[in-house]
Image (spheres, helix red, strand yellow):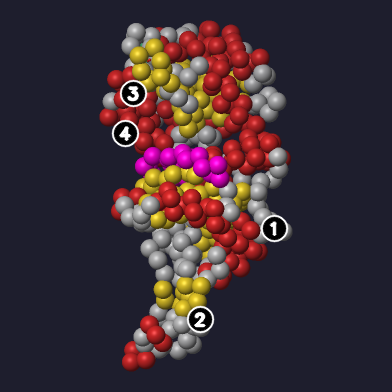
Amino acid sequence: MTIKNKKVLIIIGGGIAAYKSLDLIRILRKNDVEIKTILTKSGKEFVTPLSLSTLTKSKTFENIFDSDAEAGIDHIALSRWADIILVMPTTANFMSKLSIGKAEDLATTVLLAADKDIILVPAMNVRMWLHKATQSNLKTLQDYGYLFIGPEKGEMACGEFGEGKMSSPRQIFAYLKNYFDQRNIVKERNLKALVTAGPTREYIDPIRYISNESSGKQGYEIAIALNKLGIKTTLITGPSKLVSPKDIKIKKIISADEMFKEVKNTLPVDLAVCTAAVTDLKPAKINKNKIKKSELSFKSINFIKNNDILDFLSKNNKNRPQIVAGFSAETKDVIKNSILKMKSKNCDLIFANDVSKKEIGFNSDFNKVSVIDKKGNIKIIQKNKKSFVANKIAQILLDKLIDDRNIN
Ligand SMILES: Cc1cc2nc3c(=O)[nH]c(=O)nc-3n(C[C@H](O)[C@H](O)[C@H](O)COP(=O)(O)O)c2cc1C
């Protein structure tokens, strides 16, 4: 069991579901997980430090200005100690505080200083959950990279019914177990990925080129998200104004030919994600000198097709990645054209996006993606920041990498 001996820091907020944290602690302890807890001031109204300490066999942390605690394990050390941090229940108030980066007590300060994944487990009345303010905080927190379990739909402590019920301790345990199992598989199998991003530039002469509107944002975010899951990722990028992500191997190219070459050099990998908008055509030859304006006409330039990188990766029998996924930027019949593309290229997944819509198009910070698999299943990732979409995509790809291997 990969969850064995893991260290979980649980922050308990001031909601009626706080008592369920005691159940989760018991399940985790039975599975030999080490636990430390932080109780917020309101959380203390619902569970006692004594119950928590008895079950965790460890001190319950409450106060940031506790000289004993600061001398032993301070607010920075607490997050460094943990393998993962869980906030359960996460109240509406707590979400609001996190979304504006408050560091007003031990819990919020530890979270702001954390270098580990943080999982929020919301629990609140349905109206509180659906309130525009909470939904806006949710989007902000997702954008900051917080992970979420639930909330579920169901009957609440207040007697009302709807979304806002906290996931059960069993569900939370299953999530944590899967989280550690997956990271262990990534490490054991030494999983590697390549991601292509950005446009390519096809020079006509030293100063003129053809290219496209791609910014590279979605591809960069996918590379960052895969890397965060522990997958060793190489980002092969065309000219982009974006800052190079840290901790990721990055290969910068200009033309489609260079991208093709770098892709081949990066193989073998387990996963290839082609987000680059490779320019379809290139001039048959690049003029060494600037072509005189009087000599320049479309007829004078002979265009030929570039290599199809997605097609090459999917049909490459020798070094085919276990999963080849492509993006399909369409302006009409988005789903139909994307399915055709997936079939003709023989890739495993296609991410369809409608680039005719400015708010989710090439240069936007937002995207909305339909994830289509070979069986024709379609899953929609609703409009959100490209970083959020990338985290969803990375998780889908990791699930598929692991599931396909288990079935085959
Ligand atoms: C009996 C009772 C139950 C509560 N349950 C919840 C709840 O389930 N979810 C929630 O968001 N707030 C709930 N609240 C309100 C919170 O306790 C309050 O917003 C508090 O400031 C949250 O503290 P925290 O930010 O430390 O979690 C409840 C309050 C009371 C008095």
Report whether 33 appears left or right of 351: right
The label shown at residue 129 is 3
- Residue at point 43%, 23% (across, down): 151
Find the distance from the CA under tag 3 to the CA under tag 2. 58 Å
Q: Which residues are magenta?
A: 373-392
Taking the image as drawn, is residue 386 in sight?
A: no
Q: Earlier in the sequence, mark 4 or mark 3?
A: 3
Find disc 4 in the rendering and name its residue: 136
Q: Amino acid at mark 3?
A: Trp
Find the distance from the CA under tag 4 to the CA under tag 3. 10 Å
- Residue at point 47%, 86% (across, down): 287
Find disc 2 in the rendering and name its residue: 284
Find disc 1 in the rendering and name its residue: 317
Assign a secondary structure to mark 2: loop
Taking the image as drawn, is residue 22 in sight?
A: yes
Nearer the observer: mark 2 or 4; the answer is 2
Q: Quadrant of residue 300?
A: bottom left
